[in-house]
Image (tube, rainbow, N blue to C red):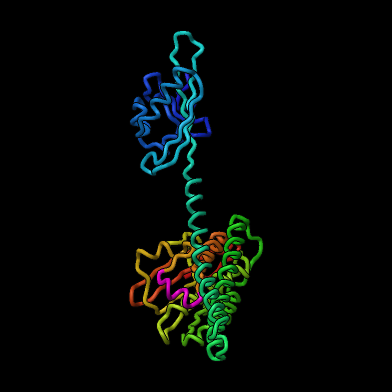
Amino acid sequence: MLNPENILNGIAVPVLAFDRDFCLLAANDGARALLSRAKKTAPVVEVFGNKSIGDKLGTALKRGATETLSLKKVGKDKRDLFITINRVTPTDPEGQPILLVTLEDRSPYREARTMRSDFVANVSHEIRSPLTAVSGIVETLLGPAGEDRETCEHFLHLMDKETRRMTNLVADLLSLSLVEVKEKRAIKTTADLTQILLSAVETVRPLADQRGKHLKIDLSEPLPEIVGNYDKLLRVFINLLENAINYSRENGEVTLRARPRKPSKPFRKPSIQITVADQGEGIPAHEIPRLTERFYRVDKSRSRAMGGTGLGLAIVKHILVRHRGKLVITSEIGQGSTFSVFLPVPKSQNPKQS
């Protein structure tokens, strides 16, 4: 005779079976993953931590009709569950009816709704600020101040700054959207990483000169070609270098270094490690895990003053996900921060590894 749990494990969705006394007869692995208290003979109230499901089981047992119920924040992980209850009547006249309870975890939908709501709120906030500034400038220029050439030039420069900020925000939003859409698509092209890094340095050099920062480049070891998209990886290193330049101290040094690496923590594959280090104020440890979130900024006012959109590191993260790479951030208050990118080396390559 088959074990009831073996039968339930053949069902793709999380499912539990209760007897007519509402005690657990069996549960499959999917159900146990959602409900840590799903132990054999445990009463339904204990399994779910909710009394209302007992009433639904009673109704299903009495009427024989399908009953449904939504429960929020069930179990240690606070899952949102949609529950369907069906009575199964045995063919044996002396057999006892069984109540089958199937579960649908709707937590991802809740999380997606929350993310969407937060995203819309953040975008609205980011766009509202420059729009408000531009609106105020236009109102000022339409008044008496518009007759003063010096005042006009001052406000037009401010307007230019705010419109560029909006342009950058829209461009980054489009870029992030495209990166996310293609995140799971395999990359079939190879890229010269040395050339990418040199191009990134030349792109940011005018910004470094403008901000009085020194660029130090260490590409002394030959780097193999990698599987990658040239333009996307170029965007990664431009973003990281621009951040380092913006947040380094005055006359500070920004260092770019690349080295082949053997498999080891935190990347257990042969890889190329590219580090971008600055001499800034450093980032508090509790802030580091959130740096790649959309619109998250450690220093909000400084970031906006420099034209930052709060999306740069989110774009970096998604590009690296597609390249099967990894971003590791380390920082020490008062000493600066290091952003390390790990990119896997194709098996056909045999670089010298350190």
Could you tell me residue 245's position as x and y percent? 47, 80
Magenta run includes residue 301: yes
Q: Residue at x 52, y 58 (%)?
A: 120
Relative to 236, does residue 156 appear above or below in the rendering? below
Q: What is the number of callouts on the image?
A: 0
Q: Is residue 205 visible?
A: no
Residue 167 image offset from top left, x and y in percent: 59, 72
State the predominant SS element of the stretch in magenta. helix
Residue stretch rendered in magenta on the structure: 298-307
Please provide percent x and percent y for residue 46. 33, 31
Depth check, front residue: 10 or 313: 313
In this orientation, does residue 186 appear? yes
- Specify the farthest residue to the front: 144
Residue at 61% from the left image edge and 62% from the top image edge: 348
From this view, report whether residue 225 is shown above or below residue 22.
below
Write the residue at 59% across / 60% down: 177
Residue 75 in the magenta stretch? The answer is no
Residue 101 point in image, percent of width and height: 46, 28
Q: Residue furthest right?
A: 189
Q: Left or right: where does residue 182 sit relative to residue 12?
A: right
Judging depth in this view, the residue of 34 and 341 nearest the camera is 34
Residue at left offset 42%, top offset 84%: 252
- Residue toward you, 15 or 83: 83
